Image (cartoon, grey):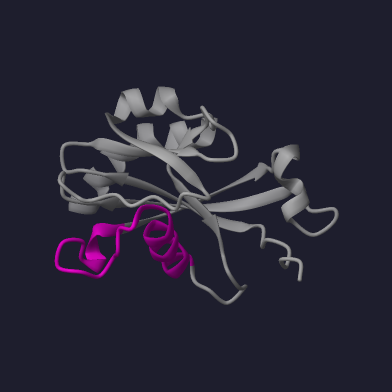
Amino acid sequence: MPKPPKIPQSVLVVIHTPELDVLLIERADHPGFWQSVTGSKDHVDESYVETAAREAAEETGIVVGTAAVPSGALLDWQCEIEYEIYPVWRHRYAEGVTRNTEHWFSLEVPRDTDIVLAPREHTAFVWLPYQEAATRCFSSSNAEAILQLPERLKERVR
């Protein structure tokens, strides 16, 4: 049975330590493509917060809502961008869908957090200082989000 088409509403989750080291994961289907956690809603009624927590768990093994990573560690930036879906991935969406809306989050985790990748999706991970992580991303919007991290975290404190 074929998979249903992806919903063109997704999340980007910048996972970082208190020291602003950022987790990047390498795509299994495109070696050399490094990114933050991303993923589409499973169903239209799934909230972006639910999608962000689910994708973090699926792609990295990090479970939000535990003693190590409390729910408050997931910060909704209240920021959305719309972008053109890369042609190589458009077959995953309904015919004629060419644009996606992405909602941005950050997730602060302890430095010693264990990472368990989903091997069908990602093959490697690396922790990098946020500025260096931004230069490694294949997506310019992902890089932009990472560069905004220090400012977004200041807003949380206010």
In this picture, residue 50 sits left or right of residue 42: left
Q: Residue 136 at what x, y percent from top left?
A: 43, 25
Give the total of numbered labels: 0
Q: Residue 67 at what x, y percent from top left?
A: 14, 68
Q: Residue furthest bottom?
A: 45
Q: Which residue is drawn at 24% across and 59% down?
A: 73
Whether residue 26 is visible, yes or no, is yes
Q: Residue at x 36, y 53 (%)?
A: 60
Q: Which of 70 and 34 is in front in this view?
A: 34
Asked if residue 117 is positioned above or below residue 88 in the image, the reply reads: below
Asked if residue 136 is positioned above or below residue 83 in the image, the reply reads: above
Q: Residue 84 at what x, y percent from top left?
A: 70, 41
Which quarter of the rendered picture does the N terminus lie within?
bottom right
Q: Which residue is drawn at 85% across and 56% down?
A: 95
Report which quarter residue 17 is drawn in: top left
Q: Which of 6 and 153 is in front in this view?
A: 6
Q: Is residue 67 found inside the magenta-colored segment of the image?
A: yes
Span highlighted in magenta in the image = 48-74
Whether residue 158 is visible, yes or no, is no
Q: Nearer the viewer, residue 128 or 2?
A: 2
Q: Is residue 14 found inside the magenta-colored segment of the image?
A: no
Q: Residue 48 at what x, y percent from top left?
A: 48, 65
In this picture, residue 15 sits left or right of residue 142: left
Q: Residue at x 85, y 53 (%)?
A: 96
Asked if residue 128 is positioned above or below residue 76 in the image, the reply reads: above
